Image (tube, grey):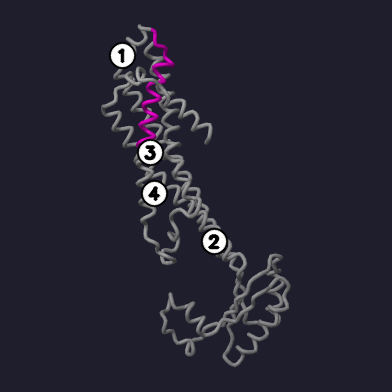
Amino acid sequence: MTGGVARILRAVRGDAASDRVVPPTGFTVRLTLFTAAAMAFLAVFALALSLAAGRLADRWGDELARGATLRISAPADQMDRQVGAALRVLETTPGVTDVHALSEAEQRELLAPWFGPDLPLDRLPIPQLIAFSETAEGYDPDGLRLRLQAEVPGAVLDDHRRWRRPLVAAATGLRILGWSALALIFGALAAMVTLAANAALAANAQVIAVLRLVGATDDYIAGAFVRRFTLRALCGAAAGAAIGLAAVALMPDTGDAAGVLTGIGFRGWHWLWPLAVPALAALTALLATRAAARRVLGSLA
């Protein structure tokens, strides 16, 4: 990034005479400014999506990695005995900690989002849930299942792995999608700047011919176009990034109600990431304009 900033600074440093080579107005100015602003605005949202998906994957992985649930289905007259046996098995299993049998109120709260708060647990055959965590060393799920099968026939172990893997995979896919979108955004910006630079160079073919007659080199001419288009892209991208940051900051906080969409935005030092968008847009414009100028000037020779 430091090298790219240095290249941008060298490109935008020039003299007043060379700046007059490129017309300061026209549709190429509006096209470059609008394209850079729009792409920077989208880039901020792509960054927000990617970073939020990364946080989501980490949170899902952390929350589900250490937790597990034991579900006991048994006749009412055997439930207390099987729950007691299951608690003894879990408490004597290496790698298992924080064993806790959920109370009726906790189970009602757990089922409320699906069945409502007035679920009559006392009249329904609801399984008893036992929640526990694993230590850093972990436990042997296969060995635990064998012990439960022998001592608590109605117990079913759910270690959350079948839930965790697809959730983390989905969040990781969203993160990759965000970075891919970011790459496509800057690719589209490069294409649009190339078109605008080609149009500006073609429109100034006679001016370029006169400059060559008075001794101007192709590097001097190309530098003038590179400098003007780099500044345009930098200004447009700065405006677009600022609007994008404001839009992200004003997004309502939905808490946990939005599911996958929870937490889209920037957190902590991640707010510094969008500040790199204008510099990246300017570097993209610099490289695209330089390539276009060399190609067009070569064809005009």
Q: Magenta residues?
A: 215-238
Q: Residue at x 41, y 32 (%)?
A: 190
Q: Is mark 4 on a helix, strand or loop?
A: helix
**Is residue 35 positioned above or below 70 on the image?**
above
In the picture, the disc for residue 237 is: 3
Magenta segment's dominant SS is: helix
Q: How far apart are marks 2 and 4 (CA)?
A: 24 Å
The part of the image, by quadrant, that contains residue 191 is top left
Residue on which disc 1 sits = 207
* Nearer-N-terminus badge (2/4): 2
C-alpha span from label 4 to label 3: 12 Å
Q: Kindly check if marks 4 and 1 are in contact, taking CB atoms under 8 A apart as contact.
A: no
Residue indicated by mark 2: 59
Confirm whether the magenta stretch covers residue 221: yes
Residue extending farthest front: 16
Q: Which SS class for mark 1?
A: helix
Task: Bin the neighbour count of mark 3 within 10 Å (Cα to Cα): few under 14, some 14-19, many 20 and up.
Answer: many
From the viewer's side, name the closer residue of 216 and 189: 216
Residue 245: which disc? 4
The answer to which quarter of the image holds residue 37 is top left
Q: How many labels does the image show?
A: 4
Q: Distance of mark 3 from mark 1, alpha carbons? A: 29 Å
What residue occupies the far left of the structure in this picture? 26
Q: Within the image, what quadrant is residue 14 found in?
A: top left
On the image, the x and y values in percent for residue 32 come to 33, 32
Mark 1 vs mark 2, foreground winner is 1
